[in-house]
Image (spheres, rainbow, N blue to C red):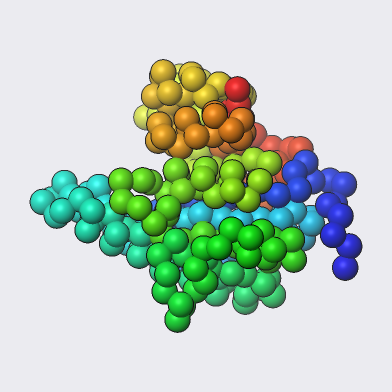
């Protein structure tokens, strides 16, 4: 099989970051299997272009550490619980992708050998080179860091060319487009602007890490069918965060 990228693809290796909430569909909690399947189809369509893909999925649909600590739970414990939630989501996505014939590895920053691989950078790079989808779970393995920061960290370690942040809206706006009709979408925006205007693309440490390593972040709508593949082929609506 040829390892060359399909000429339609703009990038050879990317990281897709999605929230745990993206997997729950219209439910208020947990996993919605048809939604997981739909996202898996999107990932497969991009992998079929010849693009090497890794993923980071949040855990907010099951447990959010910050919310737990706000209710009196000790922050470190709450964050570890949130990390375990991301492993559950990663396993669900692996199951959906393998059901489509896509070889997938779940790689956890917290070792749990019965269900997934431990994070070893060189091994993960090798999986990507073999066109396997790698799902990085359990964040960075440390409390006080979000899955946004984990996504930026892994994208740098894997030498990804861009971070794709799948959201409910088709880019970065100056205010919430759901609440304000006059919200303006940016085609491009700088890392510093995102931080200064608190535009909510990712948390500040993730944006700073992307800026320091000049890693572009592409914000797009995960609800748009074919949107992920379309952007990689140079089409569609999105916002690019860059230097």
Q: On screen, 100 above or below 12? A: below
Q: Where is residue 41 in the image (x, y as percent from the top left)?
A: 64, 63
Left or right: 181 as drawn, with respect to 38: left
Q: Which residue is drawn at 51% across and 54% down?
A: 56
Horizontally, residue 205 falls left or right of residue 117, namely left
User: Is any atom of residue 168 visible in this view?
Assistant: yes
Q: Is residue 44 visible?
A: no
In the picture shown, does residue 25 fall above or below 94? Answer: above
Quadrant for residue 177, please give it.
top left
- Farthest residue to the left: give it: 72
**Spot occupied by residue 106 in the image (x, y as percentages of width and height):** 53, 68
**Which residue, as the protein is rendered here, is positioned at the far bottom?**
114
Residue 233 in picture, x, y percent from top left: 77, 43
Q: Residue at x 43, y 23 (%)?
A: 195
Q: Which of 222 and 150 is in front in this view?
A: 150
Question: 87 and 125: which one is in front?
Answer: 125
Residue at (39, 24) in percent of width and height: 198
Residue displayed at 51% across by 63% down: 119
Q: Is residue 141 above or below residue 215?
A: below
Count of numbered tags: 0
* 32 with respect to 143 (left or right): right
Position of residue 206 measured from the top left corner of the image (x, y, whole percent):
46, 37
Quadrant assignment for the N terminus: bottom right
């Amino acid at each position: 099989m040829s390892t060359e990228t399909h000429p339609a693809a703009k990038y050879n290796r990317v990281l897709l970051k999605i929230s745990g909430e993206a997997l729950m569909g219209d439910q208020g909690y947990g996993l919605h299997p048809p939604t997981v399947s739909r996202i898996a189809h999107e990932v497969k369509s991009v992998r079929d272009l010849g693009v090497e893909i890794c993923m980071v999925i949040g855990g907010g649909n099951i447990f959010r550490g910050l919310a737990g600590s706000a209710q009196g739970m000790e922050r470190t414990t709450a964050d570890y619980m949130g990390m375990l939630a991301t492993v559950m989501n990663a396993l669900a996505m692996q199951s959906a992708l393998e059901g489509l014939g896509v070889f997938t590895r779940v790689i956890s920053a917290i070792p749990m050998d019965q269900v997934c691989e431990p994070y070893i950078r060189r091994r993960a790079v090798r999986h990507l080179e073999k066109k396997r989808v790698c799902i990085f779970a359990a964040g960075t393995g440390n409390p006080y860091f979000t899955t946004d920061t984990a996504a930026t960290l892994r994208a740098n370690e894997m030498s990804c060319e861009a971070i794709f942040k799948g959201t409910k809206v088709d880019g970065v706006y100056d205010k919430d487009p759901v609440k304000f009709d006059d919200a303006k979408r940016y085609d491009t925006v700088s890392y510093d602007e995102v931080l200064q205007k608190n535009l909510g693309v990712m948390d500040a440490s993730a944006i700073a890490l992307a800026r320091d390593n000049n890693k572009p972040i592409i914000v797009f709508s995960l609800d748009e069918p074919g949107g992920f593949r379309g952007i990689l082929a140079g089409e569609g609506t999105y916002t690019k965060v860059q230097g």
